[in-house]
Amino acid sequence: MCGIVGYIGKEQAAPILLDGLARLEYRGYDSAGVAVYSERAESLSVHKAKGRLQVLSDMLQGGAALDGTVGIGHTRWATHGAPSDVNSHPQVSRSGKIAVVHNGIIENYAELKAFLMDKGVPFTSDTDTEVVAQLIDYFYEGDILQAVVRVLHRIQGAYALGIICADAPDQLIAVRKDSPLILGYGEGCSFLASDVTAIIKHTRDVGYMEDGEVAVLTRDGIQCYNHLMQPIQKEISHVDWEIDAAEKGGYEHFMFKEIMEQPEAMRRAIFPRIKDGEVYFEDFGLTKEYIRAIRKIYIVACGSSYHVGMVGKYNLERLTRKPVEVALASEFRYMDPIVDENTLVVVISQSGETLDTMAALREAKRLGAKVLSIVNVVGSSIARESDVVLYTWAGPEIAVATTKAYSTQMAVIDLLALYFARVLGTIGEEEYRAVLEEMLRLPGKIEAVLADRDDIQYFASQYFNHNSVFFIGRNVDYALGLEGSLKLKEISYIHSEAYASGELKHGTISLIEDGTLVVALGTYSKLFEKAMSNVVEVKSRGADVLALTTERHKAEMAKTANAVMTIPDTHDLLLPSLGVVPLQLFAYYVALMRGCDIDKPRNLAKSVTVE
């Protein structure tokens, strides 16, 4: 995720752009840049810097060093190309006339880049965004809007674009597809931004661009067009939020905002990796021969990432028939692991800087294993030292309790399992197609779960005063329960434990008494009857049971459980990707009702860089 801001008016643009970017830095902070049209030089003045926004701000003396009243700015969370001055946005065409800022992913950028290079167009960055700038320049014949429209017919993916042209300094162009972009209406000025945070200081009158829309911003107003380039009248909304709240996009907490962002994050993680009905990893560093030679897979991670690994174990073993072991990163070095050149070690980390995970990675490499990492931060230490990297593209998370990073990690490991199974020939054609189709539907189904959040809030109001909670489940439901339990304990401070349901009778059931809250997970259809037996078992000891199941099993579960949360039906492999969302919401609402500091729970930090 990246931050975009644009301004055209009568005031100096650079200070306004930098101020807007400061409010968007939570969306990306590995580099930043601005492009402003200089009336004095009659050309674009572009300044970019790797690192936090303050580096750029100091370079430009807070914007005072840059003249001009129209410009675009960007704060970056790298996806294509490591953080650097060159890879920072705005990306500029070879003529120097066109600058582009971009949030999203251009899925067919490699094909377009090859086309342009065949035409003699040079490239200076590793970004997919430069392709957009160069392609606009290639089609530009004096009408910048016409050139942009021609490009839109050729690019694929999700994007929000801000575009400025030196030949047309009286306008900015904005484009949106599957990535948010907001228009701001001021007196004698206009704004564009990826979040109202960036512009609320200057205007509270905004319009929300829809997919496929194009907008032309001038000092006198904004003209919007639909996907057919027919003029449309944009509805203007008045924002009543205070600035502090607007930094969270109007949400009370970053955690809730990030829960709600999961459909978009999943689209970024999944859609570019399914092409022509096949799982596709660009520049994948594992050959088919190596994959076939793998004798064992280790998954190494900490915290929520470890829980992703637990789900990954079930799915990888089922699909590939290779043995998979999940190890806590802090234990891996000390367990004398059996690792050799035919062992693949999959390292999962949100930040890419977790010290225990880093140490485990180095131990695995010392022992001769190949290391594949699943991380969110481009250019992080784990990414740099791994043999193969798969980025989650979740965007930055502000809340300590992970939500969208967990979900995107799960999506990536599921795609990896499918890719391996395809290479190994251990999955049938029908199931392969069925899982891929369901993966493409996951973002929409997550949106459906989020739409029913009022029910989950009600359940939280009934159970928030419990001081001890048990999560039970079997197979992937057990792995899912581990994450649900962690979410609840880390932000609400309620004692919570997750158990494999079959272990109840081996000791845990002695803790069940009248009024004990048990969250029973019964989404896995193959073991639903056993899950029901465990519900009956704890109910007979006096437990209050809050169940989670699929729509097709809701009626049966409701006969016994006190309350039932549901998720849409999907392929069994993907149930945890849907099931985690109501558990995140339940934890959030419980913590909210208990008055906890949700975004910054006590004693916890976002990235653990000490052992």
Image (cartoon, helix red, strand yellow):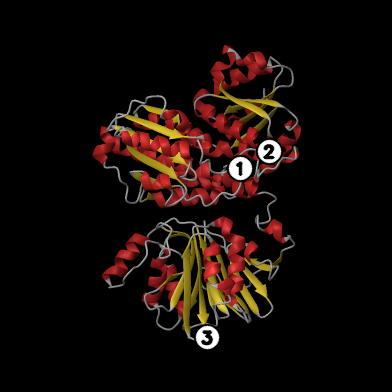
- Distance in Å between CA atoms under marks 1 and 2: 10 Å
Percent from the top left, x then y, of residue 207?
64, 67
354 horizontally vs 386: left or right: right
> What's the residue at 52%, 44% (across, down)?
405
User: Which residue is label 1 attached to?
Assistant: 449
Percent from the top left, x then y, of residue 506?
57, 12
User: Which residue is label 3 attached to?
Assistant: 39
**Amino acid on which the number 1 mark rests in the picture:** Val
Q: Is residue 313 visible?
A: yes
- Of labels 1 and 3, earlier in sequence is 3
Q: Nearer the viewer, mark 2 or mark 3?
A: 3
- Distance in Å between CA atoms under marks 1 and 3: 51 Å
Residue 166 vertical placement versus 26 (above, below): below
- Distance in Å between CA atoms under marks 2 and 3: 56 Å
**Alpha-carbon neighbours of circle 3 within 10 Å: few (<14), some, or many (≥20)?**
some
Instruction: Assess whether mark 3 and mark 2 are in contact (beta carbons under 8 angstroms).
Output: no
**Amino acid on which the number 3 mark rests in the picture:** Glu
> What's the residue at 47%, 48% (across, down)?
376
User: Which residue is label 2 attached to?
Assistant: 456
Where disc 2 sits, the SS reads helix
The numbered mark at residue 185 is none
- Of labels 2 and 3, earlier in sequence is 3
**Amino acid on which the number 2 mark rests in the picture:** Ile
Quadrant of residue 590 within the rendered picture? top right
**Alpha-carbon neighbours of circle 2 within 10 Å: few (<14), some, or many (≥20)?**
many
